Structures are given as structure tokens and as C-alpha cells.
Image: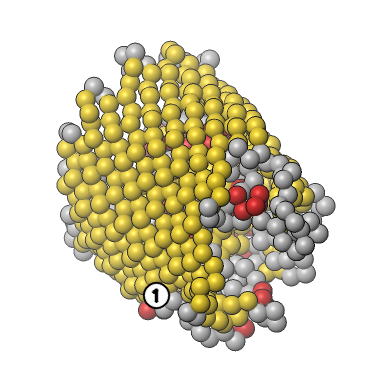
Amino acid sequence: MPHRKILLGAAALAAAIPATALPEDRGERALDHIVVEGFRLDQTLPEVGSSVTVITAEDIEALGVSFAVDALAAAPGVTINSNGSFGGVASMRIRGAGSEQTLVLVDGVPVNDPTAPGGGFNFARLDTADIERIEVLKGPQSTFWGTDAIGGVVSITTKRQEEPFEASAFGEYGSFNTFRGGSSVGYASSRGEFRLGLTGTETDGISKADRRNRNPEEDPYSSRAIYSRGGWHLGVDTRLEASLQWSTADTAFDSYSADAQGNVADGDEDDETTELTGNVRLSWPLFDGRLENVVSVGHAEIERRSLAGELTTFTADGKRRIYRYQGTLAVDARNALAFGLEREETMANGDEASSDGYFALYEAKPVEPLVLTAGWRVDEHGRFGSQSAGRLAAAWSASDSVTLRASWGQGFKAPTIFQTTFFCCGATAPNSGLRAETSESFDTGVEWRGVDDRATVAVTYFDQRTKDQIDFSFALGGYENIAKVDSRGVEIAGSYRLNDWLSLTIDYAYIDARRGTGEPLARLPKHSGDLAARFDPDGPFSGTVLLRHNGTERAGSDASLGSWSRIDIIGAYGLSDSVELFGRIENLLDHDYQQVLGYGTPSLSGSLGLRLRY
């Protein structure tokens, strides 16, 4: 396939052609000021010892995407599987680790679904309108965040009001009779700030089951979301913050069919989901500002109902609540210590679980260009007992142009409530001997930045091993620790600014992930990546041309999905300082492809919209 040859050829040349992983060109000065909040020590990107991708609101706008899952696909090492567009279940893998092994945070609150068998998060419904930034922390992060962070963390920060007054609205209409719109308003003063917004989507959709398999029925999708965030200065650097997000979605699905590809065909299935996430945070300093204290309480809940026609076939109700304290002590100019404790309480369909965590992180800068980080965490879980995780990392700015990084970390994932309570198939009780899944990983990399800020290239090698992975056993009639996964590979990200109005970016990942038997993981391509050209000349027009590639992958024990490449075009035209016309063409060459066996994807499609800012 010619697009594949172009992409892989570009990846092979990335080390020679200075190339950032996203459409926005970021020079050295910008990188030096991007603080990675997910590592809990307020380190800037040059100080971070392990691999992380930061996706900003500007990146999301340049990509023209409506849902977070499409923005995440731009991060090297991240692969996406979606069983149908417009609300279908969308899962992501970080370096081969599944969605159920990835902790998802919204303003620091865990939002993984406690009612799901593996406790994963469905990215298909998460709109981008309220997202300020997404951090993708790759590899085990349990030292920072505890359970579920066995393969990585996706930390989402919502937008905060900064201007004295700001209002915006947008609306777009596109293929499949799709309408998406929203608005927001915010106010800020010396006393504090507040922001309120809403967004909604309505579409006739496409058939979840691939239309090429004689499935013409459209599966509609609708969603609504309300979000708010505010902060108040209480005096003497004491600050109170709160955020709240509420959403509801109605998604049509197709039905199980034993005779169809992927066991799915047209049918009358429907899923209704309501989600609520909130967070309250109080921060205050002590000892002349040397000790920063933060106390927070977070709450997330989800209600799901599935219907076949008018018959309710499934209901689920889950809640997660987190109580957290963190202190960060600036020992001196070269040493910092963070420490804290957390309590998490989880409920799923009437069953409950809880855990208590204690952690300490130490940052040292023995010489100016070298940053060392070490951490340790212990969790006491009410169902499976005690688990600990350690971490070491180093970042060395060898020169103004070269940064070397290396990190080692451990992760763990407690069995979910579903896994510890479900049994069937002749079993008389659930498996009481389930152990936590554990992982150990290291990565090392180098980043080069040109002295003129025109070019960057970063190469990272990783190796991760997961043990005691939990899977369902028909012989046991329940869940047990039966799987082992080894994953290793290379990530490449780079950018090159040809002139003042044109820049090129590339990201590429090679991932070789196998079970203990040597069998490659399903739904995981070895090769994936993006190649993008961004146009931003002086004047009203800006745009991005994006080539996205996904390599061949196994779809099961006896099936596979072919590689695919897709070209998208995104553009915007400023009619005035406050009015902008924007549009997107997706799958320009109208290629047929599948992300999950039996499930279809949109053909050539597009949308056109108007954005107002005051």
C-alpha cells in the first residue's frame, strides 16, 4: 500500500530529518515551560525522566477532532480499537497494555468504570470541548496513582477561566446528518474565576456492524454534557477550587449473530449512559511557602442501561470516591520531597471495595542539567491485601540541544469488583485467590532540538513485562491469574518547521507485545503512526493535512485485520477577530477498513461549522 510505504519510510528517516508528535510546532522555550501535572512534582518536560505526550487544546483544535479518542490516537505508542463510530465502545492501548490497565483521571479524579468487568474507561463519549490538556504517561505509574495505572495514565485537565470575561459558541453540521454544538461563558477577577459550558451531539450515525456485510441499518447517537470549573482565592495564597462534569449519552448498537463476521449484525440494541464527575480541592502554603499542602475530594459515578427493543437487558450502577492529601516540600533549591496519603472507595451494583495508599517522591538536582526522581508507594486493599510499587527516573540535559532520559517503574492492578464476585458455568463461588496484576518496565530515550528551534526528534525504547494478568476461565467458571504479557518497542516523534507558515510532524511506534506462550496480542498493530503537515500563514487561513496509519493486527485466534491508512484534511478561516469558519474532511480517499472485526467505520465524510469567540 503506497501510504504505508510513505509513512514507514518517513519513520525510518526520522532520526536523520529533524522532525513533535502533534500538529502544533513547539520550540525549546515552550517546552521548558510545560509542566507535567501527572508526575505530581510539577516537573517541566525537560525534567521528566520517562516518556510522556502532552496534547493541548490548541493541538485538539488543529486536529479538528470532536472526541478525545481521536486526539489520543496522535500520541506515539497509543493504539485505538473502536467497535463502531459515534458512541461505540472505544478502547485504547498504551504500549500494548489494555484500556482496563490504564488509569484515566479527570482533574485528578479516577473515572474508570467500576461496573465494567476489567474496570476500563470508554473514550467514545468524551467530548473535547472542555479539555484544556491531555497527558499520556506511558508505562507503570502506580507509584504516583496506585491501582489501575499498570500500563499508563491518561490525565485530563479541564479548561480554567483566565480572561476577565469570555464567551464562545460553536455549531457544525456534517455527514450522516450529524450536528454538534456548544457554548461557554466565563468570568475572572482578582478574587477568583468561574466557567460554565455545555455541548451536544446528534447524528443518524452509520451501521455499527460493517455495511459491507449487508448491514444497512443506521445506528444513531446522541449526547449532552454540562461542565463547570471555578476557583476562589481565600487569602494568603490559600485557594479553593471545584469542578463538575455531567453527561448523558444514548447509543444504538447492533446485535450478536453467530453467523456474521465478528459475530455482529444489524439489530435493535440500545445503551443509555449517564456520568457525573466532581472534584473539590483546597491548597495552602506553610513555612514561608516551602511546604505546599493540597487536600481534595473527588467523586465519579456512572449509570448504564441496555435495552433490546423495549426490554431492559442490563443495568449497572457504579461509584468511585477519592480522598487525597499531598504535601510538597522544597527542601532547598536542589531537593524536593512530595508525600501523601489517599483513600479510595468503590461501589459496583451494591458490592463495595476500598483501599488506602501512602506514597513518597523525592527529586534531586545534584548538578544543574541532571534531575533524579525516586518514589515508593504502598497500598492496602480490602479485598486482596498489600501491594507496593517503586520508581526511579533520570533526565540529563547534556547540552542545549540534547536531553537523555531513563526510567524504571513498577505497577499493580487490583482485581475489580466484578472479577471478585462473578462466577458461572457450574462454579459454586467466585475465585477467592485472585492476586493483583503486576508489571515492571523500563524505558530510555534521547531528544534532540535544533538550536534555531526549527526541528526536534525524540526516540524512546521501552520494555514492559506484566505478570498474573487476570482473564476469564471457562474451566474454572470465573476469573483467575492465567496470563503473562511481554511488550517491547520503539517510539519516534519529531517535527520540522520548513518556514514561518509550514511545519511537518511525525509519530511512529513499533510495538511487539506477546503473551507468555509467544502468541502476539490481538487488536494490536506492530506498526502505527501519523504524518501531518500544518499550514499557518499570516492571514485568515490555517489547516492540517493528516495521514494516519494502522498496521496489520490479529483479530482473534483465526482472523486478522489488514493494515489501513486514512487521510484527513482540517481547515479554518477567520472571518473576523471573533468569528471563524472551520471544516473537516475525513477519510479523503474513501478507504474501507475495520478497527474491530465485523464493525464498520465511516466512509468519505465531512463537516462544516462556525465558531464565535467574545
Residue type beneath disc 1: Thr
Determine the secondary structure under disc 1: strand
Q: Is residue 104 visible?
A: no
Q: Quadrant of residue 182?
A: bottom left
Q: What residue sits 43% from the left and 48% below the top?
A: 300
Of residues 52 and 271, the one drawn nearer to the viewer in this rendering: 271
- Residue 157: image location, x then y, percent: 39, 44
Q: What residue sits 54% from the left and 31% below the top?
A: 357
Q: Can residue 227 be seen in this view?
A: yes
Of residues 444 and 342, the one drawn nearer to the viewer in this rendering: 342
Q: In which quarter of the image is residue 79?
A: bottom right
Q: Residue at the front extreme?
A: 428
- Residue 572: image location, x then y, percent: 31, 63
Q: Residue at the right extreme?
A: 517
Identify the residue position indicated by label 1 in the image. Answer: 203
In the displayed structure, 269 sits above or below 158; it is below
In the displayed structure, 133 sits above or below 174; it is above
On the picture, is 70 further left or further right than 117? left
State how the image is colored. Answer: secondary structure
Of residues 383 and 368, the one drawn nearer to the viewer in this rendering: 383
On the picture, is 579 further left or further right than 22? left
- Residue 122: image location, x then y, percent: 51, 58
Figure label count: 1
The crowding category of the residue bearing disc 1, from other C-alpha atoms within 10 Å (few below 14, some 14 to 19, many at least 20), is: many
Q: In which quarter of the image is residue 297?
A: top left
- Residue 326: image location, x then y, percent: 44, 27
Q: What residue sits 16% from the left and 37% below the top?
A: 189
Q: Quadrant of the N terminus?
A: bottom right
Q: What residue sits 44% from the left and 52% below the top?
A: 301
Of residues 394 and 6, the one drawn nearer to the viewer in this rendering: 394
